[in-house]
Amino acid sequence: MKVQSLDLRPQHEKFQRELEDAILRVVRSTIYINGPDVAEFEKDVADWLGVRHAIGVSSGTDALLAALMALELEPGDEVITTPFTFFATAGCTHRAGLRPKFVDIEEDSFNIDPAKLEDAITPRTRAIIPVHLFGQNADMPAVTDVARRRGITVIEDIAQSMGATFEDHPLGTLSEIQCFSFFPSKNLGGLGDGGLVTTNDSRVAELVRNIRNHGAQVKYFHERVGGNFRLDTIQAAALRVKLKHVGSFIEGRRRVARKYDELFARADLNKFVVTPKEVHGRHTYNQYVIRARERRDELQKFLAQNDVSSAIYYPLGLHEQECFAYLGHKKGDFPVTEKVCREVLALPVYPELDDASTLYVASKVAEFFRS
Ligand SMILES: *Cc1c(COP(=O)(O)O)cnc(C)c1O
């Protein structure tokens, strides 16, 4: 048996006809930039998420960059985020001329620890970017509580957690700006790169729309410096097809996660393996990430020998990345992040993964620790 981390084929086959029709319609229309599908998708996704404004952009990374640019901060202002995430949050902070400031994570949710926020706030702190990692919410009530008290803007990185809910509220209703990605592996995956900024603030929405178009309301007259952050019409057309099914994709991911949970509980591996916890609201399991208390790299090798692919998200905290050496961090600054970087292993999970595959993966993990 062979189990891939992600196989996009079953999902594609289900919607192949609809996707190809939608794309062909765009190809024949010849309106490849800002075609009607972009506005239609923005309307559909705003309704689905329950927000006033949705602005399609070229990627999740560009969503973060455009959102930060829309805050119109001073060079060197500080943005608090987690050191345990994909590079984009801190990378965009740097690119926007701002200074990333890291706060360690909660061990059980892998997300920013609100108890450690206050200590990181300085007079120059302007924004906090909590990331909802692997499909699970950060502790938003606690994060926004601190932010409101200190007058700091919250931008959520929801790239991995679109469709997660928190006490019946869809994720993204508790902050000023939200950023999403449609990279093919995300909960709503496009056929290439794509992203989204959402907000209830009309002024922010107007700024992001302006920034995604080189800061020009009227062509060739630039109010500010922006970028080319537009969502392609073809991507918008494909995303409109798939948006209707995000709920069922998430159900599929949760089914796989429940299966793994059951299998690991039955295998009684607590001594060796920590399974993901659903800590803050409803997890969407964009990734099913276990922690191997020991021998993680050997486990990964053993799984590979048995045709099970797995991935390490993430092998190194952002504070230890070479490009951020200027921030002056050293090993030991964020101990929880550093610990989980040594232990995490993402097992195969996608909505269509069948029980036989889940069983095979879990049995190979058990076999490794038992032998
Ligand atoms: C994928 C991802 C991004 C960036 O999205 P792209 O569309 O790949 O640019 C940002 N943040 C997190 C947490 C992600 O997982």
Image: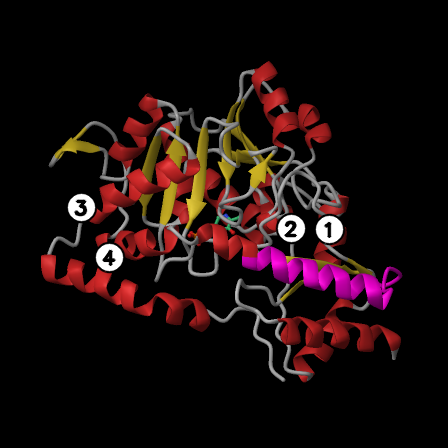
Query: Under 8 Å from ligand 1: the CB of mark 3?
Result: no
| Foreground residue among 251 and 32 | 251
Q: Which residues are magenta?
A: 252-272
Residue matched to label 3 = 36
Q: Is residue 122 above or below residue 132?
A: above
Answer with mark 1 or mark 2, whichever residue precedes in sequence: 2
Q: Position of residue 328 (x, y in %)?
A: 64, 41
Residue at position x 66%, y 79% in the image: 304
Is there any visible trace of residue 313 in the rendered image?
Answer: no
Q: Secondary structure at mark 4?
A: helix
Q: Say if mark 2 contacts mark 4, CB within 8 Å.
A: no
Q: Secondary structure at mark 1?
A: helix
Q: Secondary structure at mark 2?
A: loop
Residue matched to label 2 = 317
Q: Say if mark 3 contacts mark 4, CB within 8 Å.
A: no
Q: Is residue 185 above or below residue 243?
A: below
What's the residue type where badge 3 is placed? Pro
